[in-house]
Amino acid sequence: MGLVEILVLATACGALALTVWLPQRAVRAVAGLWLAAALFVGMRAWLGPWPAAGLGATLAAAGALRLPERLLRRIAFALPSLVLLTFVTTLLMYLAPGNPFANERAAPPEVEQALRAQYGVPESATAFFAIYVQRLALEGTLGPAIKVQGRAVEDLLLPALPVSLSLGLLALLLAVAIGVVLGVRAGLRPGSAEDLSNMGLALLGISLPNFVIGALLIIVFALQLGWLPVAGWGGYPHLAMPVLTLALPYAAIIARLARGGTIEVMQQDFIRTARAKGLPERVVVMKHALRGAILPVVSFLGPAAAGIMTGSFVVETLFGIPGMGQWFVKGAINRDYSVVLGTALVYFSLITLFNLLVDLTLAWIDPRVRDEL
Amino acid sequence: MRAAGPASAGPWRQAWERLRHSNSAALGACLLAAIVAACALLPPALGLDPMITDPAARNLPPSVDYPFGRDALGRDVMARVLAGGRTSLLIGLAATASSVLIGVLVGALAGFYGGRVDEVLMRFVDFLYGVPYMFLVILVMLLFSDTARGDPLPVFLALGLVQWLTMARIVRGQVLALRGAEYVTAARALGASDSAILAHHVLPNTLGPIIVYATLTVPTVIILESFLSFLGLGVSLSWGELVAEGVAVINPLRSTWWLLFWPAGFLATTLLALNFLGDGLRDALDPRGPTPNGP
Amino acid sequence: MVRPLAALVAIVAATLAVAGLTFSTSSRDPAEFTFVNAAEPETLDPAHMTGHPEFRIAIEIFEGLTRRDARTLRPVPGVAHTWVNSDDGLRWTFQLRDDARWSNGKPVTAHDFVYSWLRLLDPKTGAKYAYLLGGLRGAADFDGDTSGGFGIDRGVYALDDRTLVVELEAPIPYFLELTSFFSTFPVPRESVEAHGRGWFLPETIVGNGPFVLQSWRVGDRIRLSPNPEYWDLDAVALRSIDVLAIENPTTALNLYLTGAVDWLPSLYPVELADILRERDDFYSGASMIVYFYRLNTTRPPLDDPRVRRALGLAIDRREITEEVMRLGQLPAHTLVPPGMPGYSAPQSGFGFDVPRAQALLAEAGFPGGAGMREIGILYNTHEDHKKIAEVIADQLRRNLGVHVEAYNQEWQSYLASVDAQDYDIARAGWIGDYMDPNTFLDMFVTDGGNNRTGWSDPAFDALIAAAGNSARAGRAPQALLELAPEPAALLQRLVKLDAAGNPSARRDALAHFRLELLHQAESLLVNRGYPVIPIYFYVSSGLVNPSVEGFYSELEFPDGSSGANLQDLHPLRDVRMRAGAR
């Protein structure tokens, strides 16, 4: 690492830390600026520069004035975060051995030079970072992919994103469904046979890597029974096994959280009151216990979503699914710098967004949290 | 209770009593001890060598001489599973240790000093929470791949690097609560330095949640390593690698099931044992504490 | 509780709907013929292709001056219907057929070839395979500027729309073969210039092969359909082809076993080789790929040729081919795979001879392996390479008493380590680009980009240089004659022939002389220098649906003889599915 790299790194870290000291008004201004910039870059390709700038500025101004300060502080924090992420990722990629143009057959140096110029991949990390950021800001593109020639990174990620998102969301919902049912039923009668069997089942889910579970599912349901297709992404039957495989480990964790939450909530005074009032047990559980049981589950949804999204590459490989996971692994292995940065930025934004949604949901369910947001 | 007084025998003894009477924790501890003992003692005792090949005697099912069978190169599966256990457990422990170290340091600093220090540190934790962790792991792995030569060091470094965030949050919460406790104020009034207060009064009282979370981090790390092995980025001769190899040979044409069954069985048993132990510890030490962050 | 439940159901429904939109439409309506391509092609621009996954598709959507006959893999008329080679072998004249058209209906002309070949040679294009046309007159000095006439205007030019002339610096025995190799395929100038880097995407591609690219969903599948403008459309039988980008061997095999795939080229768990070999739908045959280990000749103790040879002598290749790989691979003691026309391999200094190996090691100062540091075997991450490296490490430990450790690196790190010569022993494989021994030998010249062993032998360099330009070798430096005495006799004959002035006899003698030089060069590698240890020659193998006709896993020549499909090439132009196959 040279002096320039260290300087850029320090600046980005400093900017990140500085958002803590920003006074309220400055937060509104900075967040508004970031919002405007983000909206501009995002909409430019569709609307053209001027309408995008106008609409972006209007929306951003409205947001800066109306949104609560806590939220704006998060937005102010987002841009330096993205810059830091981009730069650190670039540095790590450049420090790793190899480069995107290396090949088993050595090409003459002119060939590598020509390709480096064509793709905008100079030999210095900082120079690449400069080109990358400039391209992103001015042209709104994530840069050309090198190992999938002829396409920009967004051309690869855009079709893959809905695949991964729907796969991940379905897995998350399935995990919540299985987990809450198992966990709540177990928690209502701790120590019972049902508790033991439910929790034993849940533990199995976290005891084996999911590629083992997936492989066993394929053997049974696709090859022996022939009920489901072995791999691919062409219809709803294709969804069944990947979703289940992806969901199981998280279902296990959610079951344990829900069990803990239920046990705790069932000891509370208001449950005793409700029972004392003679409400039927079903109502007590559905109306009162469930809300308490679900709180720890909701706060786990953020990390769970992040885990499911970034962990989906195993399932995608196993089931031959054209999702995002492949890009993030292939990009890193091929040293396809722009692909790596593009996936990192998309994942980062998604995870941050999802964490925000989870916090908002928590505030909606639990008034105590609302003040902290 | 924990926030109420300095570290004393009282709560710890209570916790120990609770732990002793927890069946699942006892079961977990016994299983774990058995597996650790097997991995550490059996190979030298029986003279097992996981690297001796004999391709002509490949894929033989379990027998008296080779109770776990032999693999595709005629190697002793028992020797490989036990050696793999050493690697996997070592990685689990080392990665957890490094995550505890970083997590406790960051969490304690943030919680103890509070204010801007806290906010800045937590900002960075928030930032890192947004970074896809597998991504960081893979990048760090690549960084070391040319010098590693199958050395597990980069793997646990990478895995430890992404596991400390939740630990930092937990410790911060605990320390934040303890900071204002009366005995801390008293110690400060007596002129104790910050580091002395942290080391003698605050941290010992956060030990419960730290132990619980650390116990639950070990299985997470072992699973993460198996994902890396699945991608071909893992360590040589770990359970993850053996399981990934075993999965590849399970198919309807021919199943050399023992290549998957034994490593997967050992892996699953270890993870179950660690989870049992972790749950038992939580019930004993920190009933409202965390559950693991998942694979 | 009802409202959240309803919301949940709505979310599930919405997600399922989104998922439905992302399904690949083509997989709901399977193609007539589906095959697994081991990887997503990096590009469909012939100038930038380098690998087999690209080759498989390139021959379907483009056609060169010649194309490969599926039955013999020999060049047969493609865009060119006739050609002549001059007596001195330096000038090729191709007559293009009148009805050769691009998929947009425009004719394929000689100018298209001139444009495409110059584009390949232009350093600014950054084509990795540009060197294949390096033998064209003026190609070496070509800087991409076509205006000044730097000699390239005499390397390839169009006499008229239908006549293409190619002039060479020296005869290239495999030149005709190059005209059906992907790098020399024509590219559509208009489309390339209008659309730049992504001209070959389905929306903008223009091709001239039997099929056209209908859709391409990265990470999923490529769909091909017949090219209505193809000059021999009547011969094209398949109505649609799906090319799947599956990289996981187990997944690929499962797809084949469930009938979702008709052709699976060599992507299945190696563990099942012996079972698969028993199946009727399995094929295997020799191929033009060698598996070998590079030795770092700059690092002690491997700087001692005796140590290098000892390692090579202590490896039991039969155990690798018969007990580990089990597909009928041939143990390799030399580097050039068998089957090169007219070429015979030299005697090799690498047999399997443990006592001899131990003696050599003792001679080098390491009796019984004592005193030798631990040696690492580097391989790139792959199941097969791991197995082989672990068995060889164990063999060397057992046979020589040396400490050997096999370790892996992922592809890019492996390339960087090998390139920087940061290894002791490194696994390698080499695929011949054309049917000639030179493609396996010339990489080991001193400081050659693909040498990577640090080995250097001036005699070897001289032999390779002379073979590269055997026409001028008639005036070969005296040094060469001293270094390689055996070709000298041949050379004497050559000089006499020259005097006699019989051109065709001279051409044959030259070709023979050239192969003799290469034979001598290879002999230096495996009898004197030992910078590499050959392990085995690959076989190409795969599974193909029995209903597929016109697929030749073994070549059938007009004289009734048969031969291996050395390049594992299967043009799909003439493939058809037996009626009622599905």
Image (cartoon, rainbow, N blue to C red):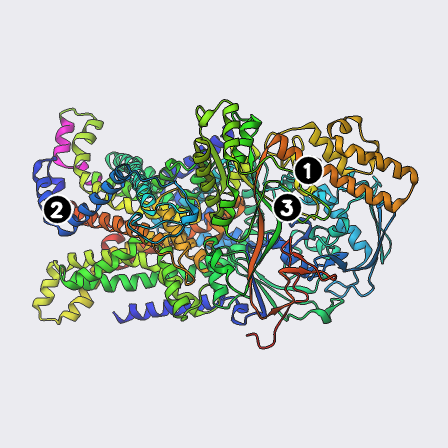
Q: Is residue B188 magenta?
A: yes
Q: Decide which of A298, B270 is in the foreground and name it.
A: B270
Q: Position of residue B97 (x, y in %)?
A: 28, 37
Position of A319 relative to A37 (above/below)? below
Q: Chain of mark 3?
A: C
Give, as a single range, the part of the protein colored magenta.
B176-189
CB atoms at circles 1 and 3 under 8 Å apart?
no
Residue at mark 3: C337
Q: Position of residue C26 (x, y in %)?
A: 55, 68
Q: Decide which of A104, C338 is in the foreground and name it.
A: C338
Q: Are marks 2 and 1 on the same chain?
A: no
Badge 3, how many Cα within 10 Å: few under 14, some, many 20+? Answer: many
Q: Position of residue B179 (x, y in %)?
A: 19, 36
Q: Amino acid at mark 1?
A: Asp
Q: Is C390 displayed left or right of A249 in the figure?
A: right
Residue A267 in which image quadrant: bottom left
Please tell me which residue is depicted at 70% across the width and 31% down the height of the picture: C461
Q: Amino acid at mark 3?
A: Pro
User: Dividing the image into 4 quarters, which one contains the N terminus of chain C?
Assistant: bottom left
- Asked if residue C421 can be seen in this view, the reply is no
Q: Position of residue C19 (x, y in %)?
A: 45, 66
Q: Secondary structure at mark 3?
A: loop
- Mark 1, mark 3: which one is toward the viewer? 3
Please tell me which residue is depicted at 12% across the width and 71% down the height of the picture: A279
Q: Which mark is residue C442?
A: 1
Residue at mark 2: B19
State the separation of the CA atoms marked 3 and 2: 68 Å
Please tell me which residue is depicted at 12% across the width and 46% down the height of the picture: B19
Q: Chain of mark 2?
A: B
- Mark 2, mark 1: which one is toward the viewer? 1
Residue A228 in which image quadrant: bottom left
Q: Decide which of B292, C99 is in the foreground and name it.
A: C99
